[in-house]
Image: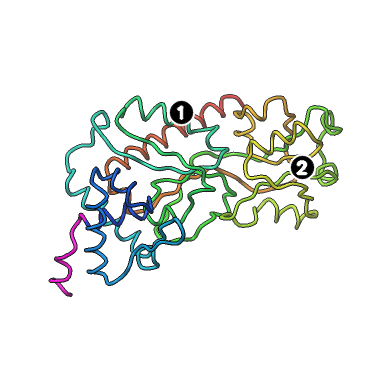
């Protein structure tokens, strides 16, 4: 262990690296840390010399993290969380808290949880700042690097989409799949059969992180593959396409009940066994050392439970 070399790296260096990995901008990092850009640049220079690595390099108009910087990200994030816990042994007070948290979720989750969660959190902790990203922009890599605190997403319960170490999955909402269609669709007044379901084109959702959905595999094994006529990035766009075509859209019942885009569409149960689906909360295991993040986790759980009870009472 080189204690002399270690003594040259301070928490200031680690925090600067952590923020730089999130922003990829000296100016934005300086604003977040309430420092001057020259001060951030100086700290980075010291860290580069200590680690013998460039850490960030310019590609066109953008800064890009080196492989070493990306590899250090999760470890640095954990170290900062543990140091924060050491310095904040007193009980967490949401009313006086000043800090930022980042979440990513599917567009379908915005409809179910985002508005209620924001209202609940900001009522109790008005100084807290929430950044809610589309999961298309920030995903599991961002969670592992400490750029996100939580991800909320729908998925087949038999297929957690990621096997990365230290990622914790917790079910927020149990759900079921339904088929949406235009109220003027030829199948609107019929009981949906498997032959009906497979005879029409379908709208699919693009997702690079998820494996092939279990319900797709079940359908192909029990019957045959459905025909995906159009792929779109989100549930709302798919529902809008249903309004203007005879395409079918398979989605979450809870989303279909809550979403404005799905209003007036016909909802029918799927005519085959497709397994179980849910919405899950995902986080990096060491992050729960932070009392503030633990408090935010509790708020997410409470909002999800309220939503589940409301859905149960309607059924």
Is the C-beta separation of discs 2 and 1 under 8 Å?
A: no
| Rendered location of residue 150, percent (x, y) | 42, 45
Q: Is residue 73 left or right of residue 96?
A: right
**Residue numbers of the magenta segment:** 1-12
Residue in front for this viewpoint, 222 or 9: 9
| Rendered location of residue 230, percent (x, y) | 74, 46
| Rendered location of residue 96, percent (x, y) | 23, 30
Q: Residue at x 59, y 39 (%)?
A: 175
- Residue at the far bottom: name it: 1
Picture quadrant of residue 159:
bottom right
Task: Read off the residue under disc 1.
Answer: 116
Task: Read off the residue under disc 2.
Answer: 271
Classify mark 1: residues with Cα within 10 Å, few (<14), some (14-19) or many (20+): some
Residue in front for this viewpoint, 89 or 205: 205
For marks 2 and 1, give the CA distance: 33 Å
Between label 2 and label 1, give the one nearer the viewer.
Answer: 1
Q: Residue at x 37, y 40 (%)?
A: 297
| Rendered location of residue 56, percent (x, y) | 36, 62
In the picture, the quarter occupied by the N terminus is bottom left
Where disc 1 sits, the SS reads: helix
Q: Is residue 138 left or right of residue 200?
A: left
Residue 254 among those drawn in magenta: no
Q: Residue at x 58, y 48 (%)?
A: 155
Instruction: Pick whichever of labels 2 and 1 is earlier in the sequence.
Output: 1
Where disc 2 sits, the SS reads: loop
Classify mark 2: residues with Cα within 10 Å, few (<14), some (14-19) or many (20+): some
Q: Is residue 10 above or below residue 101?
A: below
Picture quadrant of residue 193:
top right
């Amino acid at each position: 262990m080189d204690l002399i070399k270690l003594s040259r790296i301070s928490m200031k260096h680690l925090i600067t690296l952590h923020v730089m990995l999130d922003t990829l901008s000296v100016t934005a990092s300086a604003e977040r840390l309430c420092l001057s850009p020259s001060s951030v640049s100086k700290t980075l220079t010291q860290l580069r010399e200590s680690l013998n690595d460039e850490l960030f390099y310019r590609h066109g108009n953008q800064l890009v993290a080196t492989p070493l910087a990306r590899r250090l990200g999760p470890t640095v994030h954990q170290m900062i969380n543990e140091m924060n816990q050491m310095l904040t042994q007193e009980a967490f007070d949401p009313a006086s808290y000043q800090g930022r948290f980042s979440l990513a979720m599917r567009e379908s989750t915005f409809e179910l949880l985002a508005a209620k969660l924001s209202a609940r959190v900001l009522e109790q902790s008005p100084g807290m700042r929430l950044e809610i990203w589309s999961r298309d922009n920030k995903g599991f890599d961002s969670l592992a690097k400490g750029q996100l605190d939580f991800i909320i997403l729908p998925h087949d319960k038999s297929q957690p989409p990621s096997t990365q170490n230290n990622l914790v999955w917790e079910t927020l909402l149990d759900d079921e799949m339904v088929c949406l269609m235009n109220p003027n669709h030829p199948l609107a007044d019929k009981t949906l059969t498997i032959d009906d379901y497979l005879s029409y084109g379908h709208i699919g959702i693009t997702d690079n992180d998820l494996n092939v959905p279990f319900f797709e595999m079940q359908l192909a094994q029990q019957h045959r593959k459905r025909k995906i006529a159009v792929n779109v990035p989100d549930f709302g766009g798919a529902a809008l396409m249903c309004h203007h075509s005879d395409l079918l859209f398979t989605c979450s019942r809870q989303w279909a009940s809550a979403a404005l885009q799905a209003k007036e569409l016909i909802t029918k149960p799927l005519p085959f066994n497709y397994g179980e689906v849910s919405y899950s909360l995902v986080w990096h295991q060491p992050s729960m050392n932070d009392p503030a993040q633990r408090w935010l986790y509790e708020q997410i759980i409470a909002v999800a439970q309220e939503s589940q009870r409301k859905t149960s009472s309607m059924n």
